[in-house]
C-alpha cells in the first residue's frame, strides 16, 4: 500500500488523526509523512465543508454504516484545490469496536473537467439544433406571410387609386396599409433570424454609417440617453448589408435605452480585431471589425443572457417587446459571415459586439447589372408575369397593367416557357420559389434562347443562387408598385 502512487491511501485513528501516509497521498496532497502524521484529517477540507462540519459527519456515517463515499473539493498543502473521490471505511476489531478508518482518495479533477466539457458540448449542440428547427419554422411561416402581405399591400395600393377620395375611406385605407406594413416589418425580422432574408452585401464604411445615424438615434432615444461614438476614421470597410446593419444598430440601441430607464450613456464604437482559431465559436479565424454597442444599464443575469437571442424571448411584458430584436441581429450577422457576442452581467451593463468580416480584397458585388433594350422600343412593354401563387400573380398583373404595360401571366415556369416560345416579350417578371422549376432555372433557360432578355426575379427569400454576369434584377417581396417600376427600369434601361 505504501508504494501505490495513483491513490492516496492512509489510516486514521478513531478521532480522525492521520496514523500513516502512502506515496500517493504524498503526491496528491503534497505533504510528506513527517508533516502530516498525527494531524487531524479535517485540514484537507475546504472552508465551506468545514463550516458544514463535513469531516465529522463523514466519520459518523462510516462509523454507523461501515462506509462513507463522496465526491468533493479537497485542499492540497499549497492551498490549491482538486476534485476528489473519497472513500472512508471503518475498521472494527474482533468485538466490533471501531479502532480506526482506512481512507482512499482519488484525484479526479481531469475526469470532472472532461465531463463538464462534454456536458457543455451537448448543451451547445442541443441549443443549435433547437435554433435550426425554430429557424426553419419561422422562415417558412415568414415566407408564407410575406406572400399574403404582398397581396394585401398590393391590392390596397391599387384600391387607393380606384375609389373616390373621401377622407374617411382614405383614413381606413391608410390604416390598413400601416397595419400590413407593420406585419411586413415583422416578417422581415423573422426572415433575418432564420437567415433567409436577401442581403444586399457591399463594402460599408462603419464610421460613415454610424456617423449618419447619430442624429436619428438622439431623436429616437430621447434626451436622457447620451449617445457617444468612438470611431477612428481609418477603420477598414466591412462586408454587409448597410440597411440591415442600420436596423441592427437601432435594435441594439433601443435595447440599451430600455435597460437604462433612468437615462445613461450609450457608446457605439468599432475596433479591428484578429480572431484566432477556436477562440470565437461560429467564427472562422481571420481579421474582423468588431462593432460594439455598449450601455451602462441594468445588465442581464446568466439565465436571461443565455436566452436573449432566442426568438420571441422578451422580458418586456405583453405588447412591449416582440423578442425578435436580438434574434434578427444575430441572424443577420451570422448570414454575413460574422458573429454576435453579448457580454453582460447584472448591474454592469451590456455590450453587444458585432464581428463583421472585412471587405478587403473582396469585390463589391452589390450592384445589379442593368441590361439595356433597344431604347427606341415602345415604353409600354409586353411583360410575361410568372408566379405559382394566384393571389400574388393577380396582384402583380394588376400592378404591371397599372403601370401601363400589357401582361400575359403564367402560373408555372413550364407554362412560361410555352408562352415564351410563341410570343415576343420585352421583360419577364418571375417569382423565384416555385415547385417543379424555380425562377432562377427559368431565367437560365430563357437566357439560353435570348441572352439579353431583361428578367426580374422576385423573392422574399435569400435562396437565390449567387449572381452571374447577366444577373437578373432582384426584387424583394413584398414590393410596392413603385419598387416594381424601378426594377423594370433597371432591367430594361427604360425610364417611364
Ligand atoms: N442592452 C440590454 N440590457 C439588458 N437586457 C437586455 C439588453 N438587450 C437585450 N436584453 C434582454 O434580452 C431580451 C431580448 O431582447 P430582444 O431585443 O431580442 O427583444 P426585446 O427588446 O424584448 O423586444 P423587441 O426588440 O422585439 O422590441 C430583452 O427583453 C431583455 O431582457
Ligand atoms: Mg429589442
Image (cartoon, helix red, strand yellow):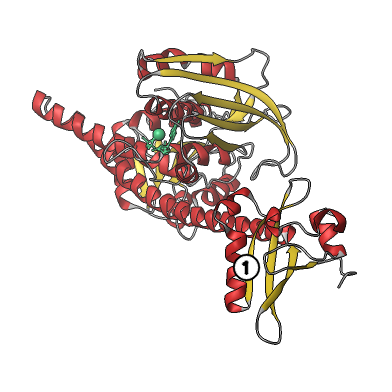
Give the image location of residue 487, x and y in percent: 45, 31
Element under disc 1: helix
Give the image location of residue 164, x and y in percent: 11, 27
Residue 74 at least partly seen? no
Residue 344 at least partly seen? yes
Q: Quadrant of ligand 1?
A: top left
Return the residue nearer the eye: 210 or 70.
70
Picture residue at 24% right of the left edge, 33% below the top = 177
What residue did someone put label 1 on? 59
Q: Residues within 10 Å of mark 1 (few under 14, many from 20)?
A: many
Name the image quarter holding residue 146. top left
Return the residue nearer the eye: 8 or 342.
8
Picture residue at 67% right of the left edge, 65% below the top = 15
Please determine whether, in this image, residue 292 is positioned above or below residue 415: above
Considering the image in quadrants, where does the C terminus appear? top left
Picture residue at 46% right of the left edge, 57% below the top = 414
Amino acid at each position: 500500500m505504501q508504494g501505490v502512487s495513483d491513490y492516496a491511501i492512509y489510516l486514521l485513528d478513531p478521532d480522525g488523526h492521520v496514523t500513516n501516509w502512502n506515496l500517493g497521498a504524498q503526491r496528491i496532497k503534497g505533504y510528506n509523512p513527517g508533516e502530516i502524521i498525527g494531524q487531524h484529517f479535517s485540514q484537507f477540507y475546504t472552508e465551506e465543508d468545514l463550516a458544514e462540519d463535513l469531516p465529522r459527519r463523514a466519520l459518523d456515517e462510516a462509523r454507523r454504516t461501515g462506509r462513507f463515499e463522496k465526491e468533493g473539493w479537497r485542499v492540497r498543502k499549497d492551498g490549491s484545490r482538486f476534485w476528489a473521490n473519497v472513500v472512508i471505511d471503518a475498521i472494527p476489531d474482533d468485538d466490533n469496536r471501531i479502532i480506526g478508518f482506512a481512507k482512499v482518495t482519488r484525484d479526479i479533477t481531469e475526469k470532472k473537467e472532461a465531463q463538464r466539457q462534454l456536458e457543455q458540448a451537448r448543451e451547445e449542440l442541443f441549443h443549435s439544433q433547437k435554433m435550426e428547427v425554430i429557424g426553419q419554422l419561422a422562415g417558412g411561416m415568414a415566407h408564407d406571410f410575406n406572400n399574403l402581405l404582398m397581396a394585401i399591400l398590393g391590392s390596397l395600393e391599387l384600391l387607393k387609386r380606384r375609389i373616390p377620395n373621401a377622407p374617411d375611406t382614405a383614413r381606413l385605407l391608410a390604416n390598413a396599409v400601416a397595419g400590413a406594413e407593420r406585419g411586413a416589418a415583422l416578417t422581415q425580422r423573422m426572415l433575418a433570424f432564420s437567415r433567409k432574408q436577401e442581403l444586399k452585401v457591399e463594402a460599408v464604411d462603419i464610421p460613415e454609417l454610424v456617423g449618419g445615424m447619430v442624429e436619428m438615434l438622439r431623436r429616437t432615444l430621447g434626451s436622457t440617453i447620451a449617445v457617444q461614438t468612438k470611431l477612428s476614421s481609418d477603420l477598414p470597410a466591412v462586408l454587409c448589408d448597410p440597411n440591415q446593419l442600420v436596423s441592427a444598430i437601432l435594435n441594439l440601441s433601443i435595447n440599451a435605452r430600455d435597460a437604462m430607464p433612468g437615462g445613461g450613456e450609450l457608446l457605439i464604437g468599432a475596433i479591428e480585431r484578429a480572431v484566432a482559431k477556436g477562440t470565437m465559436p461560429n467564427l472562422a479565424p481571420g481579421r474582423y471589425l468588431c462593432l460594439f454597442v455598449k450601455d451602462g444599464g441594468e445588465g442581464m443575469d446568466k439565465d436571461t443572457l443565455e436566452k436573449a437571442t432566442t426568438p420571441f424571448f422578451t422580458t418586456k411584458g405583453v405588447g412591449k417587446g416582440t423578442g425578435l430584436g436580438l434574434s434578427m441581429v444575430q441572424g443577420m450577422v451570422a448570414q454575413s459571415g460574422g458573429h454576435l457576442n453579448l457580454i453582460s452581467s447584472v448591474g454592469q451593463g451590456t455590450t453587444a459586439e458585432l464581428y463583421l468580416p472585412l471587405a478587403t480584397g473582396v469585390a463589391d458585388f452589390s450592384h445589379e447589372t442593368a441590361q439595356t433594350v433597344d431604347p427606341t422600343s415602345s415604353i409600354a412593354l409586353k411583360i410575361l408575369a410568372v408566379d405559382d401563387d394566384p393571389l400574388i400573380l393577380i396582384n402583380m398583373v394588376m400592378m404591371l397593367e397599372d403601370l401601363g404595360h400589357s401582361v400575359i401571366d403564367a402560373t408555372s415556369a413550364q407554362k412560361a416557357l410555352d408562352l415564351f416560345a410563341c410570343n415576343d416579350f420585352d421583360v419577364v417578371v418571375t417569382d423565384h420559389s416555385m415547385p417543379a422549376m424555380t425562377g432562377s432555372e427559368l431565367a437560365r433557360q430563357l437566357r439560353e434562347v435570348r441572352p439579353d432578355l431583361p428578367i426580374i426575379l422576385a423573392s422574399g427569400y435569400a435562396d437565390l443562387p449567387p449572381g452571374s454576369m447577366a444577373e437578373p434584377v432582384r426584387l424583394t417581396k413584398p414590393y410596392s408598385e413603385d419598387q416594381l417600376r424601378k426594377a423594370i427600369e433597371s432591367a430594361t434601361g427604360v425610364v417611364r
